[in-house]
Image (cartoon, rainbow, N blue to C red):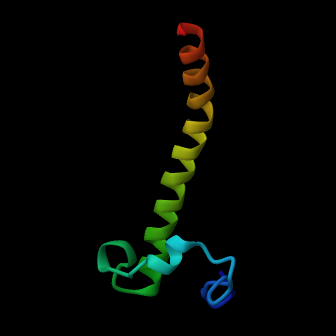
Amino acid sequence: MTSDNRCQLFGKSERPAVCLAFRAQEDTCGRSSQEALQLITKLERATALAVKHEKRIMPLLYSLKSSSA
């Protein structure tokens, strides 16, 4: 994000496809810029926790799978 809360990747080739497909809706973006930032912060925290959890769990699952083979 830029200092004025704009996407730094907008219009660039490295912008992820998910961004291109995203369509703002009230349930994800709220009714104001402030609410949008609050919602996206919550989403980022939730997904960061999921990724952190996956990084701990996946090696364990792979080791269990390979030991049972």
Residue 5 percent location from the top left of the image: 60, 86
- Residue 29 x, y percent position in the rendering: 39, 78
Query: Where, quadrant-wise, is the C terminus in this rendering?
Result: top right
Q: What residue is drawn where x is 35% and y is 79%?
A: 30
Q: In the figure, residue 58 lies in which quadrant?
A: top right
Task: Report whether 39 appears left or right of 1.
Answer: left
Query: Hey, which residue is sitting farthest front in the picture?
Result: 69
Q: Residue furthest top?
A: 68
Q: Relative to 56, does residue 14 appear above or below in the rendering?
A: below
User: Measuring 50% from the left and 80% from the top, which residue is drawn there?
Assistant: 20
The image shows residue 14 at horizontal and vertical percentages of 69, 76
Q: Nearer the viewer, residue 3 or 63?
A: 63
Residue ID at (69%, 87%) = 3
52 with respect to 32 (left or right): right
Does 54 sit above or below residue 1?
above
| Foreground pick, 66 / 40 | 66
- Percent of width and height locating residue 28: 37, 72
